[in-house]
Image: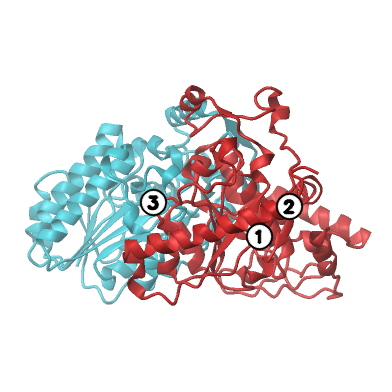
Amino acid sequence: MTPGADVIRIDARVRDVGRLRCRATTASGRPCRNYALEGDDYCAVHGRTRSNRRAAPAASTRTEPPPEAASAGVMEWLRNRLSGAYEVDDFGLDSRLLGDVLGPLIKPLYERWFRVRTVGVTRIPDVGPAMLVANHSGTIPMDSVMMTYAVAYEHPARRIVRNVGADLVYRLPFVGSLARKAGTVVAHDDDALEVLRRGELLGVFPEGFKGVGKGWRERYRLQRFGRGGFIALALRARVPIIPVAIVGAEEAYPMIGNIKPLAGLLGFPYFPVTPTWPLLGPLGLVPLPSRWIIEFGEPVAMDEYPEAAAEDPMLVFDITDTIRDRIQQMLFKNLNARGGTFL
Amino acid sequence: MGLRLAQALGADDRIDEVFGVDLDDPPVGIPRLEFIRADIRSPLIARVLNATRADTLVHTNITSSVGRAGSRSQMKEINVIGTMQLMAAAQHAGRLRRVVVKSSGAIYGRLATEPSILTEDHASRRADLSGYGKDCAEAETYARDFGRRRSDVELVILRTQNMVGPTIDTGMTEYLSLPIVPTALGYDPRIQLLHEDDALAALHACVFRAPRGIYNLAGDGVVYLSQVIRRLGRPPLPLVQPTAAAAASLLRRFNLVDFPLDQLTVLMFGRVLDTRRAKEAFAFAPEYTTAEALEDFKQRRTPERRTHVGRHHSWERELFDYLNRRGANREFV
């Protein structure tokens, strides 16, 4: 069971484009004068940052490149990094970092540790905006990382999901900057709408901290779906909602306790106690090797509702419940289908 | 900015007369500029304004620099009281048809919790601002009050992003000119820049055609601070948070960087402005993206300009000093 590896191998094409110029136009309207990278129509600067190419993190061509190209590529990559000559989007997504560093780092975790299986990833459209609505669990939000990886490496168009993150995330040193570079946006209507307006995929976890911070006994029981704000948003943007059920994150960091005073002291919504944390210190950050299934449900169209639907709270609650039910059903189904939790 | 705008307007045939108001004489002669020495903080400004019979007023004298103002209280006096008096005077200037006020993106505070791309609607409440940001908020309030009372006047408020360029001196250019660039450890903000030429072009355009409203001005695209520092080829100096503020005070004490202390959050969380409204309203089309503005700053900034104000006395030097230190308000007919 390694669908991820299959997809990567198929995409590892090496086209002989010689020394073509980069096809991109610079921000000032001039044609880019850099040479295109091997196997690419774009140069190192434009290759991964153009919106139409965002879905193709560089790891795709890096998995099995000819050896000499690999070392040249790495040198080029390092040169760009050290001179700051790479581009990021307005939200701060650093596609090269995501595709070349974070992706390969997460790969073993995704394939070997959690053995993630995906269902229905092709239900995500190849182009255009959509909102992925998923359950949230697991103390440390590993589920959003795995969902993003699943779409980036298993979807044919290899799209990047822009997850929303609570503002707490952006206030934290290191974590906040890394989250931005990995493509997350702020959990604010403006950010979410802008992502959808640009035709990208938005990842939403409406349970929020109630989802990640819930106890072991409540595993796989969906919490309240916020206040339906994300549904109103999808209605306003008229984009389809794709319900996503993530099984496995609950057991990765099972939360058996919550030291509330410590949480208050640190300004966190909860301070988790898992079987290994804080007992084993930093070792407690290693997740348990639970088996994961991520199912992407049938898209729910929002454009058949009238324009004013977002202003009708009853309708919004109604749709919220429908989506929530769907995710809950998928969760129960996949829990049964998974077999052993760890083995 | 004021000086450069006066030069640009002086060369523009569509304008009959240009008046400049400041405390100091302009360091260079500007064709067709009629200079008036006056203080916008004094009520006398009303008589000056009336005497010019101006139909357009451009206010570029909201300053972010404590150093140039003398002290923080002086700076506040210039920014807030100056705008208050000027707007009060403008209310009685019957021929006035258009007022342009240069405010700043500093008006967006609480950056840690705001959306990634700030539209004009996200100005913070005054209680959440301090220092320069608060000055801008208060000055804008006076301007808007004026706009409400004089509904026949087209009021345009421009909120500029941090400006860089080959000639302008701002907190940002001084910061980016340091041989070692201090940063906040663990924070890598998105930096967005506005090239001085684009700021000037936007001001010029607003004198003629911008419909009333508030507009963000910034270059397209963002660059992480870590990229900025690497592109400039400078070593960064990451500081833990408590020492960062102390370092900023020290840099100001030694006259190296005059970066408003309340704006240090920009160097932690970044501040990116949405310029769509300006693009739609008056076809604001920045010639420089953020990355290009930075490159231009790097290429055209001569080395001696990196040392601080006051040690070099060339004609050019004086002009630029004047331009930045005393960007006083100017009226234009």
Discs 2 and 1 lie in a common subunit: yes
At label 1, counting other C-alpha atoms closer than 10 Å, the crowd grade (few under 14, some 14-19, many 20 or more) is many
Give the drawing colour for chain A: red
- Quadrant position of residue A7: bottom right
Q: Classify residue B296 by image quadrant.
A: bottom right
Q: Is residue B279 left or right of residue B40?
A: right
For badge 3, the amino acid type reads Leu
- Image quadrant assignment for residue B119: bottom left
Query: Which residue matches tag 2?
Result: A338
Label 2, residues with CA under 10 Å away: few <14, some 14-19, many ≥20: some
In percent of width and height, residue B310 lies at 43, 38
Q: Colour of chain B?
A: cyan
The label on residue A295 is 1
Task: Say whether residue A18 is visible.
Answer: yes
Q: Of the numbered discs in the image, which one, if any, rests on residue B306? A: none
Q: Nearer the viewer, residue A109 or A101?
A: A109
